Amino acid sequence: KHGNTDLIFPTGIACAQPSVSNSRPDVSTTTPWLAPIVWEGTYDLTVIDNIYKQQNITVAVTVFALGKYVRFLKDFLESAEQHFMVGYRVHYYLFTDHPDKVPTVTLGEGRQLTVIKTATSNRWQEISLRRMEMIEKLIEKELSDKADYIFCLDVDSKFHAHWGAESLGDLVGALHAWYFGTSREQFTYERRPESQAFIPLQEGDYYYGGAVIGGRLEKVHKLVKTCRMQLDVDRANHIEAAWQEESHLNKYFLYNKPSKVLSPEYLWDDKKGKPSYMKAVRSSQVFKKYAEVRPNP
Ligand code: UD2
């Protein structure tokens, strides 16, 4: 399944004329390499949907719910059904060590869920670290003829508003709520040169959240495979990056620039309130007490 990616637009559809001025002067809407940064007000959903609906795409979603994190599944799935890629074919791939605890959620038309039984782990860092490898294998074994795009999402998050085809792209990352507007020296990149995730102080574009990785299958496959190999090297050298796979993801995105960047609207943290630049909160992290949910905090 590697459909036509041309941006074909049907004839006879009336849409607003594009403005020649910047609709969001309060925020940057492009990266220095001219990838769009997706904010409310920067796109016309009628235009977007008319382009993507006729591509007949399937979007795979991977989500991990191990140990006590199964408690987040119901809200995650129910809110995704209300807001995530509504009107598109979506196939959730749910990795869990408790298949019996997966809640029954009514899925919309064209949407399905596959549960993948996964081994239990006693270290939360290990769970987070092994996601890259499991996504890599899933893409290789399962997805190549079944999906066009993939989003790898954190389960401890909830959708609150529209998240649709405007988020699709070859390689997609999301800006972490806490480091938006922060200077790069303060980013929690891995700073030890011994780690494969090392980024020197004078480098770095943005701090991307580990909770959202997206794009076309082959691009995301290359990303997860590269990160998995670098995680393997670190493991052999007995070093664990500051923020586990999120650190490796940030290294990858620095040297393999994403073609589309999602603003913090897509990865918000409600503890930050609602600054004026946040015109919409599409998804936000669920408040959790680490001591309560992690196997070994
Ligand atoms: C950050 C990142 C997260 C990941 C992590 C790396 C954001 C918002 N969050 O958050 O994506 O990069 O740092 O350490 O960017 N999980 C389980 N069971 C467990 C523990 C984790 O299923 O016992 C899964 C689950 O899908 C969860 C994900 O791993 O959403 C990330 O773990 P986390 O929520 O503990 O990471 P967190 O919030 O510290």
Image: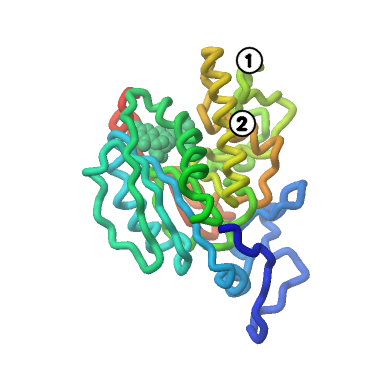
Is residue 132 left or right of 55 when viewed as pictured? Answer: left
* Residue shown at 53% from the left, 15% from the top: 236
| Residue 205: % across, % down | 70, 38
Decide if residue 20 is in sight here: yes
Earlier sequence position, callout 2 versus callout 1: 2
The residue that label 1 is drawn on is 194
* Residue shown at 57% from the left, 49% from the top: 217
Real-space CA distance between mark 2 and mark 1, rounded to the nearest whole angstrom: 18 Å
Which residue type carries mark 1? Answer: Glu
Is residue 7 left or right of 60 when viewed as pictured? Answer: right
128 versus 104 height, above or below: above
| Residue 229: % across, % down | 58, 27
> Mark 1: is the Cβ under 8 angstroms from ligand 1?
no
What secondary structure is marked by label 1? loop
| Residue 104: % across, % down | 24, 55
Q: Residues within 10 Å of mark 1 (few under 14, many from 20)?
A: some
Quarter of image, ligand 1: top left
Which residue type carries mark 2? Answer: Phe
> Mark 2: is the Cβ under 8 angstroms from ligand 1?
no
30 versus 229 height, above or below: below
Give the quadrant of the N terminus: bottom right
Q: Residues within 10 Å of mark 2 (few under 14, many from 20)?
A: some
Is residue 32 left or right of 81 when viewed as pictured? Answer: right
- Do labels 2 and 1 touch, CB within 8 Å? no
Instruction: Give me the disc on residue 187.
Output: 2
Query: Foreground residue, 227 or 164?
Result: 227
